Amino acid sequence: MLDTNTISYIARNRSPEARRRFKEAEYQSPVYVSAISEAEVRYGLAKRPQARLASETMQEILEQLTILPWTSNEAYAYGLLRARNERLGIAVGALDMLIASHAVSQNAVLVTSDAAIAKLSGGPKTINWANDLRTN
C-alpha cells in the first residue's frame, strides 16, 4: 500500500528510485492505496487548480492503483492502533494514523518515507522506496 508521500514522489519524479520500484511492482501484483491517501492527493490538487500538468500526471498514477475503501474494519483497526499508541505516548498526524490503520487492517506493507509511522506500536510493516531522498 502506497502512502501519500510515495505517490507524490512517483508522480512528480522526485525519487527516481520510487518510480523505478513502482514500475516493477505494478507488473508483479496490484499496487494499493488507501482512499485516505487518494483524498489527500485530490486535496493537494484542488489547492493548485492552475497546475494542470501535475493534475494530469497524478490522475494517471491514481488510475494505475487499486484504491481501497475505508470500512468498519479499518475503523476498528484505527481505534485499537490509536489507543495503543496514545497509551505509549506515541503520536502521528491524524491522516497518517488513518492510513497506517488501513494498512494494518489489510495486512499490507505500507510504502512510506514517514519515520513516525514506522515507530507505531502494532503499526504496519513499512518500507521506503524513496531511499534516494533525504526524508523525515
Image (spheres, rainbow, N blue to C red):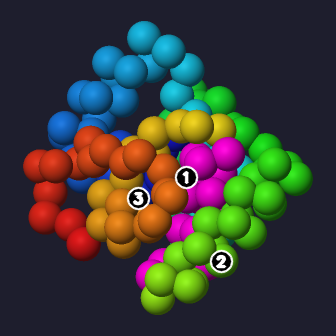
Q: In this picture, is 80 found above or below 108? A: below
Residue 83 - label: 2
Q: Which residues are magenta?
A: 90-105
**Looking at the image, is mark 1 or mark 2 earlier in the sequence?**
1
Check disc 2 and give the amino acid type.
Answer: Ala
**Looking at the image, is mark 1 or mark 3 earlier in the sequence?**
3
Q: Which residue is mark 1?
A: 55
Report the mark closest to the observer, 1 or 3. Answer: 3
* Residue 99 covered by magenta stretch: yes
Report the mark closest to the observer, 1 or 2. Answer: 2
* Residue 95 covered by magenta stretch: yes
Q: Is residue 7 visible?
A: no
Query: In 3D space, how far apart are the residues under numbered discs 2 and 3 (Cα atoms)?
Result: 25 Å
Q: Which residue is mark 3?
A: 5
Kindly report the secondary structure that dominates the magenta region of the rendered protein. Answer: helix
Check disc 1 and give the amino acid type.
Answer: Ser
Query: In 3D space, how far apart are the residues under numbered discs 1 and 3 (Cα atoms)?
Result: 16 Å
Q: Residue at x 57, y 84 (%)?
A: 86
Horizontal and vertical percent position of residue 13: 28, 45
